[in-house]
Amino acid sequence: MTVKCKVERILTGVCTAAKDYYEGVCRQYQHEEEDWYIKGVKEEMQMITDSETLPISLRKISGVYRVINQIDPILDIYKYDYLNSQLFLYRDSVYAATGPYTESECMLLVARLADKERTLFEELSKKQDSPEVREAVANRKRISEKVRIAVWRRDQGQCAKCGSRHNLEYDHIIPVAEGGSNTVRNIELLCEKCNRAKGKKIQ
């Protein structure tokens, strides 16, 4: 039987906040450069920098726990201890890995998840910036004033569904995304309630 390990990202935006926290500590103890506490702080600051390239166990950077409580006071970070989870800081995020694996194995699983997420968002970004999407946005022109007036007169200034005269909106019968046009035949007046019920609001 294959034993699976659950890996999840539980918090983002950690590194910047952690660096600010540690820098504040260093300023507070700036006249005690040889103090063992400051040395430990500087070592943890270096680990935070290192976490940009490889996952670092939070057990090695205990100060991050205080930062996590500042970022998200509602998040009970300590509950993961009861779940026997291992926590890691990697690329500005905290990951939890739960399963019967060593720290080194969990580090690899965290890195794999982060790479999958990065690849996914890169693909989504490319799709949103594709020529097809840009063309669709460009083709989605504002309804002309002439068409608006004609639709208003035809629908007698009231919702085509319920007859309400309040909170009226111009709605495409066939959505632009599905090939609909900005013509009088394809546009009707709907009140806000009926337009929301229809499920697709188009300006």
Image (spheres, grey):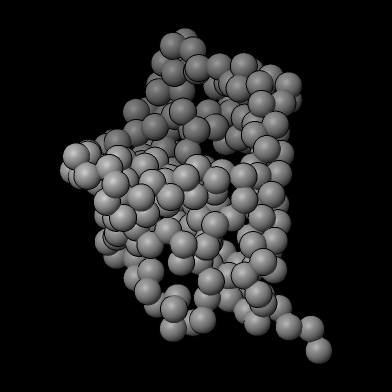
Hey, which quadrant is residue 190 in on the image?
Answer: top left
**Would you say 149 lies left or right of 37 here?**
right
In percent of width and height, residue 103 lies at 62, 70
Pick the residue in front: 75 or 37. Answer: 37
In percent of width and height, residue 177 lies at 65, 33
Hey, which quadrant is residue 128 in on the image?
Answer: top right
In percent of width and height, residue 28 lies at 18, 43
**Would you say 7 lies left or right of 193 here?**
right
Write the residue at 59% across / 28% down: 186
Pick the residue in front: 61 or 119. Answer: 61
Asked whether residue 43 is in view, the answer is yes
- In this view, the residue farthest toward the right is 1
Residue 173 position (above or below residue 42): above
Asked whether residue 41 is in view, the answer is no
Write the residue at 62% across / 51% down: 54
- In this view, the residue farthest toward the front is 34
